[in-house]
Amino acid sequence: MIDLHFELQRPDFDFQVELSLPASGVTVVLGPSGSGKSTLMRCLAGLERQARGRLVVGSETWQDNPPQRKQPIFLPPWQRAIGYVFQEASLFDHLSVQGNLNFGLKRTRQPAAGLAALSQAIDILGIGHLLKRSVQTLSGGERQRVAIARALATRPQLLLLDEPLAALDESRREELLGWLERLRDEWTLPMVYVTHSLAEATRLATTLVLMSEGKVRRAGPIAEVLQQEGETLLNAQVLSKDPAWHLMTLGFQGGDLVLPDSGLPLGSRTRVRILARDVSLSRGAPQDSSVQNHWPCVVLGWSAGAHPAQVQVLLQLGEQTLQAHITARALDQLQLKPGESVWALVKAVSLVGGSSHPASA
Ligand code: ADP
Ligand code: MG
């Protein structure tokens, strides 16, 4: 297990995270930009000297410095058996691939074991044919694979990957994701993987941690977390009113929605909750439907529901995610694939805060 508890105060940012992570598999930390994902990684790596708390990795205590503790423990980064891979691989451009990998070996206390780890990493990441190349000639994805192999050569107890796909184009991302899946399945090493992409999370995660505003909102096995996340909150603003039908239109990032006029003044901000069970899907734009709210979305993926007849489909709606609980048979009939467009039809939405009456529209 990896047990952690960190607290860190910055102006306008209150970071408090407590987690217990399994000692294997990929923990994906998912959250919007600024939610504290990189801060968490830096705490794990020992790069946040101001952070208070505790970090136990397996049988080793790397940090234990709560305010009341007289003799604080805080291992510096170089004493923590961690591999750290960032958005842009920080390779030495004047060295070959092999030269860069050898640099990883220098950090291990047992060179023979490091060499064995390195050759296994070269194999799993498929970079054997690149060893003599100058790193300047590598593609972005190849650079990342070399950076990961170099990190693995140090025989870390924990591998940290902070948005490793962010600097790659779409097809390179897809390719590197395949290599990361292979690493997850063939190397028993806990990894913490930071992203703001739900698509990456659903593909890689065994454990999912949802962060916002410096706090953990939910954490657990990915299927459980997604199931609990069966609702979406949209930040919306009242755009117009239709007195003849007693309706109002709200705008949110990603579309508009219509619902019974709750009396909120024009221009006011509110939040709207949509439950996954109230979302259905259609291949084409609905035309003769009583459902007033429908938006084009992109399918991110799906996972098994609580009942074998059910699946929960994850959708991208603007920058938000939306879930639809539909039957497995409907999913089969619609023949949906990740990345495809689909219409989400929303039967019911409710205002959060303002008026709490669920509004069917
Ligand atoms: P994420 O990786 O989720 O995008 P970060 O952990 O990088 O978020 O940042 C969390 C918050 O801390 C943000 O509000 C950011 O502006 C702030 N922050 C990050 N690094 C520093 C720093 N070195 N000094 C002051 N504030 C910082
Ligand atoms: Mg970050």
Image (cartoon, rainbow, N blue to C red):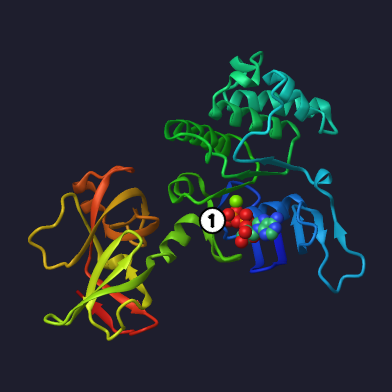
Give 205 or 174, whichever is nearer the viewer: 174
- The residue under the point 64% across, 46% down is 190
309 to 131, vertically: above or below: below
Q: For disc 1, does the CB lie below 8 Å from ligand 1?
A: yes
- The residue under the point 82% across, 43% down is 78
Q: Where does residue 330 sit, x and y in percent of width and height?
A: 21, 53
Give 81 or 285, whichever is nearer the viewer: 285
How many numbered badges does the structure rendering display? Answer: 1
Residue located beneath label 1 in the image: 33
Q: Where does residue 57 sit, x and y in percent of width and height?
A: 74, 53
- The residue under the point 69% across, 18% down is 96
Whether residue 52 is visible: yes
Give 340 or 12, whichever is nearer the viewer: 12
Residue that lies at the very extreme toward the right in this rendered image: 71
- Mark 1 neighbour class, 10 Å CA radius: few under 14, some 14 to 19, many 20 or more: few
Q: Looking at the rendering, in which quadrant would you find the N terminus?
A: bottom right
26 left or right of 300 in image: right
Q: Looking at the rendering, in which quadrant would you find the C terminus?
A: bottom left
271 to 312, vertically: above or below: below
- The residue under the point 48% across, 55% down is 222
90 left or right of 223 in image: right
Q: Amino acid at mark 1?
A: Ser
Whether residue 37 is visible: no
260 left or right of 222 in image: left
Res. 147 image quadrant: top right
Q: Where does residue 316 sit, x and y in percent of width and height?
A: 35, 53
246 to 167, vertically: above or below: below
For mark 1, give the secondary structure.
loop
Q: Where does residue 341 sit, x and y in percent of width and height?
A: 26, 46
Res. 131 image quadrant: top right
Q: Quadrant of ligand 1?
A: bottom right
